[in-house]
Amino acid sequence: MDTQVVRLPFLRLRRIAALVVLGTALVFASGPQGGANAQNKAKFVAGQILVASEKMTDPRFTKTVVFVIRHDQRGAFGLIVNRPLGDAPIDAILKAYAARPTGTDIQVQGYNGGPVEPQQVNVLHTPDYRGTGTQRIGIDAALTDPKVALPAIAIGKGPRLAIVTFGYTGWGGGQLEAEITDGAWQVIPPDTKLLFEVPNEAKWETAYSRRGVDL
């Protein structure tokens, strides 16, 4: 699946943002707040994949697959990679950031990255591309500022595959550790193909079938 090619019916950027905002409050993933005990039972999982288990009752995260960008004592930050919203024009996204438009009509598929700050755009992509400020996340993915990555995509010089997310998923200190310990999330090894190439409708089932694999 090449996320740079238009495949779904057109959705304007404002509608995409509205879909993300709908039913969303600025709260984090369901589960009890964690503390030192939870941190002792669950290690940090930055660069790995979270798969919502059957114990996940929050509808915002039911059957989601989340790539964890950052995880430390202060909390965690990740992006849902299997909830597409529709196609968004690159130039509309750039204009929302007061960035120079490319003058093209290229569109990218937008994803609901999570319920926090739905106006925030992140570009998660295959590690073959590197631009100004690109952050490598392990060996399987990278993150680049949309003002840098989107113009490169528009002219065919961007990453091989990319996921453009609106919003993100966040946890406070110890919260994700507690949710993993309680079984709300399964942790599986990172996989470029799973993140970017497995069809969205099959990502959760594919990822869930890999639970129990040694990290």
Image: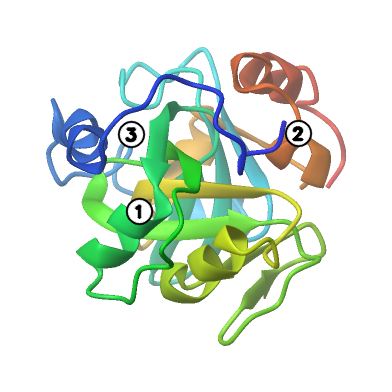
Q: Residues within 10 Å of mark 1 (few under 14, many from 20)?
A: many
The structure residue drawn at horizontal position 77% and vertical position 64%, both measured from the top left corner, is: 127
Question: Residue at label 1?
Answer: 171
Tag 1: amino acid: Trp
Give amino acid for label 2. Answer: Glu
* Nearer to us: label 3 or label 2: 2
- Could you tell me which residue is drawn at 87 percent across and 40 percent down? 214
Q: Quadrant of the N terminus?
A: top right
- Helix, strand, or loop for circle 1? strand
As drawn, the label of residue 197 is 2
Q: Is residue 112 visible?
A: no
Occupied quadrant, residue 73: bottom left
Residue 115 drawn above or below residue 91? above
Q: Identify which residue is drawn at 29% across, 54% down.
A: 92
Tell me which amino acid carries mark 3: Gly
- Depth order, front residue of 36/167: 167
Q: Which mark is residue 31?
A: 3
Query: In front: 175, or 76?
Result: 76
Compared across the picture, whether 157 is left or right of 6 comes to right
Under circle 2, the secondary element is loop
Q: Residue at x 50, y 63 (%)?
A: 150
Q: Earlier in the sequence, mark 1 or mark 2?
A: 1
Percent x, y for residue 185? Answer: 54, 32
Marks 1/2 in contact by CB < 8 Å: the verdict is no
Give me the C-alpha separation between circle 1 and circle 3. Answer: 10 Å
Left or right, 150 with reference to 191: left
In the image, residue 38 sits, relative to residue 158, either above or below, namely above
Q: CA distance from mark 3 to mark 2?
A: 30 Å
Badge 2 crowding class, 10 Å Cα cut-off, few under 14, some 14 to 19, many 20 or more, is some
